[in-house]
Amino acid sequence: MPQPADTTTAQLDALRAAIAETSGAADSEAVDVAGPTELAGPADVAGPVRPTGPTDVAGSVRPTGPTDVAGSVRLAGPADVAGSVRLAGPADVVGGVPARFVGAPASTGQAAALLRAAAELGLSVVFQGGGSRSDWGNPPRTLDLIVQTRRLAGVVEHAAGDLIVVVRAGTPIAGLQRRLAPAGQQLGLDDPLGGTVGGAVAVNGSGPRRMLYGTARDLLIGVTMVRADGVVAHAGGKVVKNVAGYDLGKLVTGAYGTLGLVTECVFRLHPVPAARAYVRCRTVDPGSGGAQRVGRLLATVLRAQLVPTALEVDAPPGGGHETVLLLEGTPAGVAGRAAAAARLLGAGAVCTGAAPPWWGRYPWLPGDTGLKLTGVLSGVPDLLAAARAAADRHEMPIGVRGSAGTGVLYAGLPAAARPDRVARVVEELRGAATEAGGHAVVLTAPGPVRDRVDLWGPVEGLELMRRVKAQFDPDGRLAPGRFVGGI
């Protein structure tokens, strides 16, 4: 809703004043991986939350003390303040909804001050990293302030001996990988869209290597976040084994920014493998026959205990399937396992040192409809067959690919397809996913399709999610309506 000019000016001034009033010790210097940044010091990540029980949601967040505040705030000058909060421009849109203001805090302390001011003004807030997933989820019901994390970037600490890294949420994943590479280490997280650490946590991102390393939720061992009221909270720590209690990091992972702003993350790392090989097998069987052959190949590979890092399948709209294993380890070990895999996959299997062009990419383009389909491993062939059958029935090109080794697939439907047909396909694939023991979620879609489908579909535990949301954001101002059930 448009606001009077005097109200807009007063609110802008209030947001800027909140950042200007933050003062104290400057943030500690951090390694820049994505251009000039200013990074928080140890006090931002070192304050552990107290152990809690499963039902103690509110107790998993504590107000910060004097030490926390001093460690998370830096001195801000007039020029810095003016650049930290501005009026939104035409490009400042989330899910088709334009914002009124854009804030870019440079520290956890500034982020806390900004959210505190937003709470006092009653502003609705959406968080944004690289913006690569701004069209995921439902459009926000209202949007006053976008809080960008682009200035919250860089590595705060890399403890190579402990295989952990403390990194700010606005750090691009690609930049973090480059920073870790000289130490022979990596974050075992793929990012198909080239986004940020915080963005991956917000949607629980993953890619092909999730089969071995897991998702963002599995790799996260500590988190610093700012609640809707501006209170800073810490959970987890800087060791792989943490105290028992309510895991705040796992709670906020995949919550689409509806519970708070993650400003820093602590991740477990893995060594960079000395060698890797891809074993590829192409099948051209049409229809469900090809999907069932893929199922037999998957079962054969999994029974063989080859310990693949990834087991992917690609079913392009033109027909056929390609199954690909990624094997990593020592040169001798990889060579032996690759040869064994090629024998198991049969005639036509080839070993290569390079991934196929489609590897780690979603099967859709900007503007298309993209779905995430999950199921038990034995249900993967049925999901592939259901997508092919829907494509034939509705005369619509549908591409499917994903982690067949974990039961997570993605489907892409063209932007030019009629919205009513897309809605029918979504309904059919949702039914197939349910029968396969999983779910179907529409990650992104054009507006006319969003108007016709429930992006999230039926979700168990919705009432519990609502209660958790009420604990963290009782006024419902963070990403309002973007998550499951309009949370």
Image (cartoon, rainbow, N blue to C red):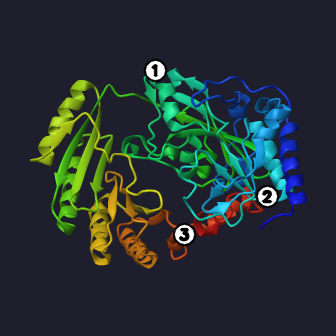
- For residue 393, which quarter of the picture? bottom left
Q: Nearer the viewer, mark 2 or mark 3?
A: 3
- The earlier-in-sequence mark between 2 and 1 is 2
Q: Position of residue 16 (x, y in %)?
A: 84, 44
Pointer 3 residue: 447
Amino acid, disc 1: Pro
Residue 123: numbered disc? 2
At label 2, counting other C-alpha atoms closer than 10 Å, the crowd grade (few under 14, some 14-19, many 20 or more) is some
- The earlier-in-sequence mark between 3 and 1 is 1
Q: Is residue 202 left or right of residue 185?
A: right
Which residue is at the front of the view, 367 or 394?
Answer: 367
Residue at x 60% of width, y 55% of height: 256
Q: Position of residue 114 (x, y in %)?
A: 79, 46
Mark 2, secondary structure of its residue: loop
Q: Position of residue 221 (x, y in %)?
A: 57, 38
Residue at x 61% of width, y 45% of height: 129
- For residue 382, which quarter of the picture? bottom left
- For residue 113, which quarter of the picture? top right
Amino acid, disc 2: Leu
Mark 1, secondary structure of its residue: helix
Residue at x 32% of width, y 65% of height: 383
Which residue is at the front of the view, 303 or 269?
Answer: 269
Pointer 1 residue: 182
* Viewport quadrant of the N terminus: bottom right
Mark 3, secondary structure of its residue: helix
At label 3, counting other C-alpha atoms closer than 10 Å, the crowd grade (few under 14, some 14-19, many 20 or more) is some
